[in-house]
Amino acid sequence: MSRMMPLLGAVLLLLVVGGTVGSHLRASRPASPLAQAGPAPAPAPAPSSRSMAELRGTTLVVRSAGQKQLEVSADRVSLSSDQRYAVFSGTVRAALHLRGGVALRLSAAEVILDRQRQDLRISGPLELTSAEGYRLTAPEASWNAARRRLVFGRGIEMSAGSSIRANRLTLDPDAQSLLLEGDVQITFTLGEGTP
């Protein structure tokens, strides 16, 4: 399972850098404060089908000190009429760049950014691949910024020689932990010559 940790670490890094995208898209009004400890906030409602603005064939590049950090492209990018939701739809692709190269790629059907809460909902099929050959697939994922949790609530499959399947995966970047739930299956592939 330790071979899977670089992929999971890259997923968490993608979310951190993705938060930067949200900051660039944020309206000038201040965001609501983070939720207090206690029960999880209710899921955000789906964005209105009416959009204030829509762009087609869009690519967004986030740079820091002149270095490309994240590149996101989508068939369509729209902003809801209340300016709360940015919706990346059609074919959505993202590439996380580290040390001058692509470290992680993401593809999905739709990504919805709640600009007020900084939450993300990703609809699949969702696929994450790393430069090292790690691969994670899932039907969906969600990031709760207040609780700092990434949840793959409808199952995951991860592979890189060995493989992991589970009905649910929760990542906690602060505790640097992951929780696999449901019908968890882990298959280890031993190298040649291993007894």
Image: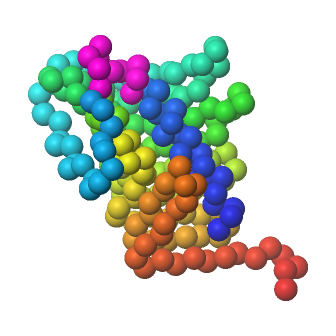
Q: Is residue 153 above or below residue 48?
A: below
Secondary structure that dominates the magenta span: loop
Work out whether residue 90 or residue 97 is closer to the camera in this orientation and state it. Answer: 97
Query: Is residue 119 placed above or below 22 in the rendered structure?
Result: below
The residue segment tinted magenta is 22-31
The answer to if 28 sits in the magenta stretch is yes
Task: Where is residue 78? Give x, y as percent.
Answer: 25, 25
As drawn, the residue found furthest toward the right would be 193
Q: Which residue is located at x 51 percent, y 27 percent?
A: 71
Residue at horizontal 26 percent and vertical 56 percent from the top: 39
For the image, the number of numbered tags is 0
Q: Residue furthest bottom?
A: 195
Rendered position, 149 above or below 114: below
Q: Find residue 38 and report its horizontal and vertical position in percent.
A: 29, 54
In terms of depth relative to the viewer, which is nearer, 163 or 32?
A: 32
User: With 21 as the anchor, is 50 left or right in this view?
Assistant: left
Whether residue 168 is in magenta: the answer is no
Q: Is residue 138 left or right of residue 61?
A: left
Based on the displayed image, in which of its 4 quarters is residue 93 positioned?
top left
In this orientation, which residue lies closer to the viewer: 62 or 75? 62
- In which quadrant of the rendered image does the C terminus lie? bottom right
Residue in the image at 45% along x and 22% along y? 60
Question: Residue visible at 88% across and 79% down?
Answer: 193
The quadrant the N terminus occupies is bottom right
Question: Furthest residue to the front?
Answer: 37
Q: Position of residue 118 (x, y in %)?
A: 35, 35
